[in-house]
Amino acid sequence: MNPDPVWSMITYVCNILGMLICLGGLSLAHYSRYRWPGRVLAGAGFLLAASPTLYGLFLGS
């Protein structure tokens, strides 16, 4: 089985979920009470969205 279609679907899912988590974290960081948890959540969402690209950059060909 060729893993290319599965990998491209995982890439889209990671990008969309990561962007949604990042946007949620940024809107949570807007309030001063939740600033640090929001920033951490936004950073985690960014890493999730960038993970397929980073994987291809460092480990893939």
Image (tube, rainbow, N blue to C red):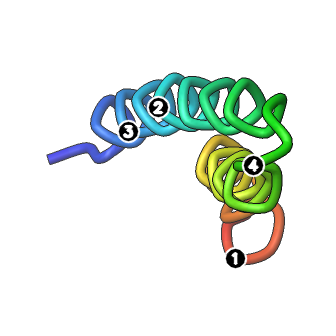
Q: Is residue 47 left or right of residue 17?
A: right
Q: Amino acid at mark 4?
A: Arg
The C terminus, quarter of image: bottom right
User: Which residue ends up furthest to the left in the rendered image?
Assistant: 1
Residue on which the image places disc 3: 10
Other-residue count near label 4 (Cα within 10 Å), few / some / many at <14 / 14–19 / ≥20: few
Residue on which the image places disc 2: 17
Q: Secondary structure at mark 3?
A: helix
**Between disc 1 and disc 4, whose residue precedes?**
4
Q: Nearer the viewer, mark 3 or mark 2?
A: 2
Q: Amino acid at mark 3?
A: Ile
What's the CA distance linking mark 3 and mark 4?
34 Å
What's the CA distance linking mark 3 and mark 2?
10 Å
Q: Nearer the viewer, mark 4 or mark 2?
A: 4
Q: Is residue 39 left or right of residue 47?
A: right
Residue on which the image places disc 1: 59
**Between disc 3 and disc 1, whose residue precedes?**
3
Residue on which the image places disc 4: 33
Q: Nearer the viewer, mark 1 or mark 4?
A: 4
Residue 39 in picture, x, y percent from top left: 80, 53
